[in-house]
């Protein structure tokens, strides 16, 4: 049981790094965001980091051939999603075009897409935990989700600290971070 806990925490830390970076960018972009918004952002990332390994585990145990074929598209999907959202943030930061409607969209669709983009690589964790029975896989995925939530909360706090000092450049920095994450996921997935 201790082995499961340690392995799951380490997996959670590794998988949460992309979500952590996005959380820092979110804190940079919105340093005055309230507690409810912070919790919602962290919860979305935690939920997706919980779900993706379970989906991967399920695929390994049921439709492994389809999952294996899909896996080569994961870096491309993450790159496209993060380039789109990061590019939009850069555009808004450079053109100073950031009104209330955009902020609402960030909370809804953008947050959902970022949750998918930062956790899509966690599908492959289904292979890592495939030797677990359903209960252990569920427990491991839950630990990964909780670790992600905590790490993202730390990221938002760090971003808020810096964001208050850099508020005018925050969307540019945040967009650049998202683009860099997309490129990193792509390079790791395709070239390495």
Image (cartoon, rainbow, N blue to C red):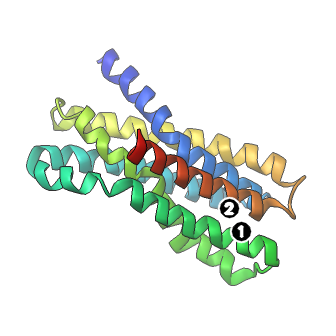
Q: Are marks 2 and 1 in contact (CB under 8 Å)?
A: yes
Category of crowding for the residue at label 2, using alpha-carbon neighbours closer than 10 angstroms: few (below 14), some (14–19), many (at least 20): many
- Residue under label 2, please give it: 175
Q: Residue furthest front?
A: 191
Q: Is residue 3 left or right of residue 21?
A: left
Query: Percent x, y for residue 172?
Result: 76, 63
Return the x and y of residue 125 as percentages of the image width and height: 31, 39
Instruction: From the viewer's side, name the closer residue of 168 and 105.
Output: 168
Query: Sequence order check: which comes first, mark 2 or mark 1?
Result: 1
Q: Nearer the viewer, residue 36 or 29?
A: 29
User: Is residue 6 left or right of 94 when viewed as pictured?
Assistant: left
Q: Position of residue 189 (x, y in %)?
A: 40, 46
- Residue at left 62%, top 47%? 21
Q: In which quarter of the view is residue 173 placed? A: bottom right
User: In the image, which disc is placed on residue 182?
Assistant: none
Camera-nearest residue between 130 and 75: 75
Numbered circle sitting on residue 90:
1
Query: Can residue 32 be seen in this snapshot?
Result: no
Q: Is residue 53 left or right of residue 151?
A: left
Separation (CA) of disc 2 from disc 1? 5 Å
Residue at the extreme right: 165
Where is the C terminus found, in terms of image quarters?
A: top left
- The structure residue drawn at horizontal position 57% and vertical position 50%, both measured from the top left corner, is 181
Horizontally, residue 156 falls left or right of residue 84, namely right
């Amino acid at each position: 049981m201790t082995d499961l806990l340690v392995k799951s925490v380490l997996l959670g830390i590794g998988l949460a790094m992309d979500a952590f970076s996005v959380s820092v960018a979110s804190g940079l972009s919105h340093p005055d965001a309230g507690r409810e918004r912070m919790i919602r952002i962290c919860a979305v990332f935690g939920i997706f980091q919980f779900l993706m390994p379970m989906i991967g585990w399920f695929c390994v145990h049921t439709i492994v051939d389809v999952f294996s074929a899909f896996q080569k598209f994961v870096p491309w999907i993450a790159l496209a999603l993060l380039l789109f959202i990061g590019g939009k943030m850069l555009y808004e930061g450079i053109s100073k075009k950031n009104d209330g409607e955009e902020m609402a969209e960030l909370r809804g669709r953008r947050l959902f897409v970022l949750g998918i983009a930062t956790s899509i690589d966690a599908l492959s964790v289904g292979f890592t935990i495939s030797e677990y029975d359903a209960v252990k896989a569920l427990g491991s995925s839950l630990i990964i989700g909780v670790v992600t939530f905590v790490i993202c909360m730390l990221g938002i706090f760090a971003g808020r600290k810096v964001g208050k000092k850099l508020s005018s450049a925050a969307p540019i920095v945040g967009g650049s971070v998202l683009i860099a994450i997309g490129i990193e996921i792509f390079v790791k997935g395709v070239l390495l």
